[in-house]
Amino acid sequence: MTQTITVIRGDGIGPEIMDAALYVLDTMQLGLQYEFADAGLVALEKQGELLPQSTMDSIRKTRVALKSPLTTPVGEGFSSINVELRKRFDLYANVRPAKSFPNTKSRFPTGVDLITVRENTEGAYIGEGQSLSEDGETALLTQRVTRRGSERIVRYAFELARKTGRKKVTVVHKANILKSTSGLFLKTARAVATDYPDIECNEMIVDNTCMQLVMRPEQFDIIVTTNLFGDIISDLCAGLVGGLGLAPGANIGTDAAIFEAVHGTAPDIAGQGKANPCALLLGAAQMLDHLGMPDKATRLRDAIVATLEAKDSLTPDLGGTGNTMAFAKAIASRI
């Protein structure tokens, strides 16, 4: 059985880490076929568009994409290519796992194993109602939170808990102050939670959540929250376990899903073979889970952990002297 996926090689270090990731996936003999598509600066140079229609058509056809980081040029095009992709495909669930890894520069080399589930299509980042007064002294932004959007993201979090054997969902909000938007989200979450009596549900204000994550991250299992809070919290969680080089992300909707490394394009080291491919490989593991290959996903994650434990060909950000492809080959050798 074969599965075709759209592959977006990205900008900056994107092509290097994608080549490394595809090398590992090919080693696993998964039956994956690749349909390559462009986005970002590469697409702008080739086709005059940051997000060409051919790329959109490919994702719509394959329904699954593996994506390297993209650059949105300052002063032109979309506010963010990633946000635009989420809007166009209604990728409402942003899923960001954070887990302790051995031999990383982290305050928590053990004990962290949580997932942030972030609403991906509403809230502050959608850009509704943005305006600046004529004198430039006042800026306004309208945030939109709906019952439908809140219900589906909270339900996704509880279903994910059941599917992965997790026991607790923490609903993160600011309903004490943002009584309309966060209030609606929290009220909806409480209603959804009644459908999952087997899963513990607790509530936490976002500022306390950040403090608790730094002090005792082991108390969290799955966090579900709105768009802006989720963006901040998920990067905080990445900092607990060694940084964005170990932080994958999934953007999941009803009709499509895009898996990625959540870090940037790092143009300062592009082409030097220094980039760490782990985030994209961990994103690929999320993709394998999504494609119904959980055993393969576990093998890939275990191989990454084993390579980190052995300190084999680690890239400079992890304290080693290896290069991107050598690290990938070391991982592949353990699968």
Image (tube, helix red, strand yellow):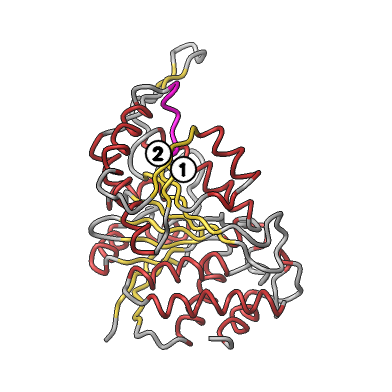
What distance separates the C-alpha of mark 2 from that of mark 1? 6 Å
Label 1 secondary element: helix
Numbered range of the magenta stretch: 171-177
Looking at the image, residue 71 lies above or below residue 144? below
Q: Residue at x 33, y 34 (%)?
A: 185
Question: Label 1 sits on what residue type?
Answer: Gly
Viewport quadrant of the N terminus? bottom left
Tell me, for residue 181, which label it has, or none. Answer: none
Q: How many marks?
A: 2
Q: Which residue was labeled with disc 1?
A: 230
**Quarter of the figure with residue 77:** top left
Q: What percent of the width, then of the height, locates residue 330?
A: 63, 83
View extreme (front): residue: 197
Label 2 secondary element: loop
Q: What percent of the width, then of the height, locates residue 236?
A: 59, 46
On the picture, is 259 further left or further right than 137?
left
- Reply yes or no: does residue 114 show up in magenta: no
**Closest to the observer: 217 or 146?**
217
Q: What percent of the width, then of the height, locates residue 231?
A: 49, 43
**Quarter of the figure with residue 275:** bottom right
Q: Residue at x 52, y 50 (%)?
A: 220
Q: What percent of the width, then of the height, locates residue 318?
A: 71, 66
Q: Residue at x 28, y 60 (%)?
A: 256
Question: Label 2 sits on what residue type?
Answer: Thr
Tell me, for residue 226, which label it has, or none. Answer: 2
**Closest to the observer: 112 or 269?**
112
- Reply yes or no: does residue 173 show up in magenta: yes
